[in-house]
Image (cartoon, rainbow, N blue to C red):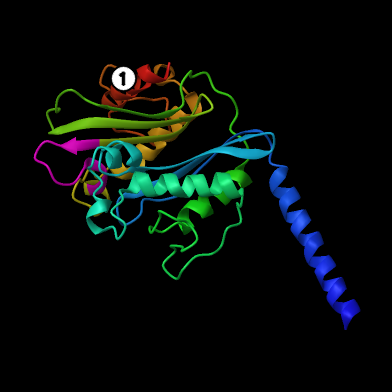
Amino acid sequence: MKKSIVALLALCTIFSVVSVSAQAKLKDGFYFAEDTAFQSSGWKDQVVLEVKGGKIIAATWNGINNKGAEDKKTESTAGRYGMIKGSKIAKEWHEQAAAVEKYLIDTQDTAFSKFTATGSTDAISGATLGVKGFYDLVKAAIAAGTVSKGSYKNNGWFYAKAPAFDKSGYAATALITIVNGRIVSVNWNGINKAGGDTKFVRAVKGVYKMNAKQGEWNVQAPRVEAALIKAQDPAKIAVKADGKTDAISGVSVTIDDFIAVAVEALKAAK
């Protein structure tokens, strides 16, 4: 019996060492992942990790939205997110997210799994929000590998909105995510002059109808976003005099408004 216990303890020790060793062997660089779709709340969460010496030295939990607004941290910091109203610990989203980020850096535990049925945890002080999505993205970011170096000087979230509404009553918005100098995510939308739902949301609901062969606006917009991620520079996407482009397959919508706000947003990244 004693031999069995000793053997079991030795085996547990080996697995523990292997686990720690595996986490310590992360390749240096930047990692990124985001949700594949917008949540019912209108947000799509993102995670950025920076690894040096095989250890996570920085972690950023953020999000983009289908409301034509800025990133989640900016919205929360400005008091526009509103989590504090229903928070048991009277903390806004960005404050709780910071506690989760710190916990990951302190523990280096990318395989954290102490979740409640609702995805929250009692293990992280200062955070009562759901954290399972964060750790799912941490795993996805690591699995995706490092983000190659890009040409932009600054990393972060860069936002711009058209200075005026167009004749259809929309003002274009662009929210661009840059990691390691590279554009990794693009969010194009339009704010309605009359208020209410954005162009993307209206298109998803079937209210903004184009009846285009290439698909509705919410179907075509992601193709334009993907084209910018590939090109890494809005100036490289050719736009015709009518505001449309032949450079992106499956796109018949005008994109000149998007190119304009993308250029404006990226000024702060250079």
Q: How many marks?
A: 1
Q: Nearer the viewer, residue 230 or 37?
A: 37
**46 and 104: which one is in front?**
104
195 drawn magenta? yes
Highlighted range, magenta: 190-201
Asked whether 106 or 167 is in front, the reply is: 106
- Residue identified by numbered label 1: 264
Compared with 90, 229 (above or below) is above
The picture places residue 240, in percent across and down from the top left corner, at 32, 18
Residue 230 shown left or right of residue 199 in the figure: right
Q: Position of residue 205 (x, y in %)?
A: 23, 53
Query: Viewed as shown, does residue 131 lie left or right of 263?
Result: right
Q: Residue furthest right?
A: 3
Q: Residue at x 61, y 56 (%)?
A: 111
Residue 33 appears left or right of 156: right
Q: Check the picture and name the quadrant holding the C terminus.
A: top left
Q: Residue at x 11, y 42 (%)?
A: 195
Residue 156 showing in the rendered view: yes
Which three-letter amino acid code belongs to the residue tagged 1? Answer: Glu
